[in-house]
Amino acid sequence: MKFGKIESKNVLGIFDVKKDDMSDKEKLVNFASNYWADAMLSAGNKQISYQIGNGVIELSDKDIEVFKKTFNDYILKIFPTNGNKIMLWTSNGEYFDRVGTDAYLRQIMKACKLPLTCLPSDICMNIYNTKIELDDSYKYDVIYSLEDKKVK
């Protein structure tokens, strides 16, 4: 095999490296943001907008990605420590005008420029530093736990 004249060139390579070493905190918050994003996409008649009579608000893939990034950034800044928790909740369409949602979700939705009414109704999520729980009429269901490596 013969090679022609090979010249030496300086080349700069940029590689996209997947971040496999996410901290436990990042894994937890990422799971929560994916949960909310999936709930928003599949809300249908459980979407607040639909329940208050305005029809379903369709979200694009870009809207969902912006939401997840904004959610992750915001929650990581206020991540709970020492047994404290962050509670994220939405009311249903019937009570939305009076009750609305918690302040954290209001800030997240404002930052990603999405209406509050595209959120699913009647969700209450507690984020602790080691687990995520859903509250369903005071029955707490752990949907993700770092200790048990449990995903439900």
Image (cartoon, rainbow, N blue to C red):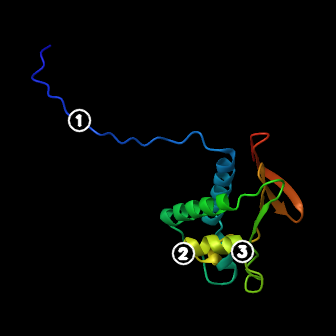
Q: Earlier in the sequence, mark 3 or mark 1?
A: 1
Is there any visible trace of residue 47 in the rendered image? no
- Mark 1 vs mark 2: in front: 1
Query: Which three-letter amino acid code belongs to the residue tagged 3?
Result: Ala
Residue at which label 3 appears: 103
Please provide percent x and percent y for residue 74.
63, 64
Residue at horizontal 65 percent and vertical 61 percent from the top: 77
Q: Residue 24 sits in which quadrant? A: top right
Q: Tag 2: residue type?
A: Lys
Nearer to me, 141 or 41:
141
Measure the C-alpha gap from mark 3 to mark 2: 15 Å
**What amino acid type should be assigned to the residue bearing mark 1?**
Asn
Q: Which is nearer the N-term, disc 1 or disc 2?
A: 1
Q: How many marks?
A: 3
Residue where numbered disc 2 is placed: 113
Q: Position of residue 129 (x, y in %)?
A: 76, 52
Determine crowd level at label 1: few under 14, some 14-19, many 20+ residues with C-alpha closer than 10 A. Answer: few
Q: Residue at x 71, y 58 (%)?
A: 79
Q: Residue furthest bottom?
A: 97
Q: Secondary structure at mark 1?
A: loop
Residue visible at 68% across and 76% down in the picture: 48
What residue did someone put label 1 on? Answer: 10
